[in-house]
Image: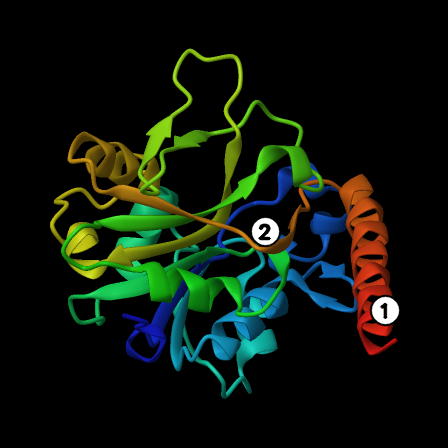
Amino acid sequence: MNQTSTITRAMILAAGLGTRMRPITETIPKPLVHVAGKTMLDHALDALADAGVTDTAINVHYLPDQIIDHVALRECPRVTISDERDTLLDSGGGVKKAISGFPNGPFYILNADSFWLDSTPTNLSGMAGNWREDDMDMQLLVARKDSAVGFDGPGDFFMDDSGRLSRRGKAASAPYVYAGAIIAKAQLLNAIAEAKFSLNRLFDDAIARNRLFGCCLQGLWLHVGTPAAIEDAERAINEYRLQGEEAQVRQVR
């Protein structure tokens, strides 16, 4: 059953230092770096709005006032700031603090430095449509490594025919890479006693229970980690859009 309308809350991880994006990030936080006409943070917020999300928490640490000012007038989705300027809590701890007011149930987690160009339906809506409360603890958006833009690592996961994920482990490569979006149950985060921990802990726990699943990204996934990657991403976006326009022309003819 498609549950897009029931997943109305999200959290965006935006507290990183952006060291690999220097010198750009010497004066602005990485989520506010512009790619293809808008900030990476706005790419994430717009994707959430398109998926029907109404309320989003964003954590901040480095140059936090710039992010706070940037989202101050945002109405869709509404934004709540989770302040980590005193102590960074790692990815899992940051999410746990930010969602302290969320009810139990599924919500989205997005990275502020990964984004994609959607096909139809959107990828977040596709994830919500695939979500199965009884079978899943977490669902990750994953991209095919061989078609990812700006990613040159060995890959993160294998995925079986049911969508269940397993780690690359000692294999030289794996066909899927984590694409920066998750559906998770809030109660999983709230059940962890520590304040500081990584989301990888939750991935491994879900794998051990056979409850970590993937949803394969449709469209173009872009990882923008360095200044040089911005130009590569914008070139890929232009080519992708041009191919889409050409396909539409062929359909009309």
The residue under label 1 is which amino acid type? Arg
Answer left or right for 140 relative to 230.
left
The residue under label 2 is which amino acid type? Ser
Which quarter of the image is occupied by the C terminus? Answer: bottom right
Q: Position of residue 65 (x, y in %)?
A: 56, 68
Q: Position of residue 38 (x, y in %)?
A: 73, 69
- Crowding near pointer 2: few (<14 within 10 Å), some, many (20+)? many
The reply to whether dot 2 and dot 1 touch (C-beta < 8 Å) is no
Q: Can see residue 87?
A: no
Q: Quadrant of residue 168?
A: top left
Taking 234 as reference, is 172 above or below it? above
Residue 139: image tag? none
Answer left or right for 151 relative to 5.
right
Which quarter of the image is occupied by the N terminus? Answer: bottom left
| Secondary element type, mark 2 | strand
- Crowding near pointer 1: few (<14 within 10 Å), some, many (20+)? few
| Secondary element type, mark 1 | helix
Q: Position of residue 19 (x, y in %)?
A: 64, 39
C-alpha distance separating marks 2 and 1? 31 Å
Residue 250: image tag? 1
Answer left or right for 138 relative to 11.
left
Rendered residue at 41%/77% (across/down): 53
Query: Which residue has dot 2 on it?
Result: 114
Callout in the foreground (2, 1): 1
Q: Nearer the viewer, residue 123 or 245?
A: 245
Q: Earlier in the sequence, mark 2 or mark 1?
A: 2
Q: Nearer the viewer, residue 225 or 161?
A: 161
Rendered residue at 51%/34% (across/down): 176
Rendered residue at 21%/42% (across/down): 211
Q: Position of residue 71 (x, y in %)?
A: 55, 77
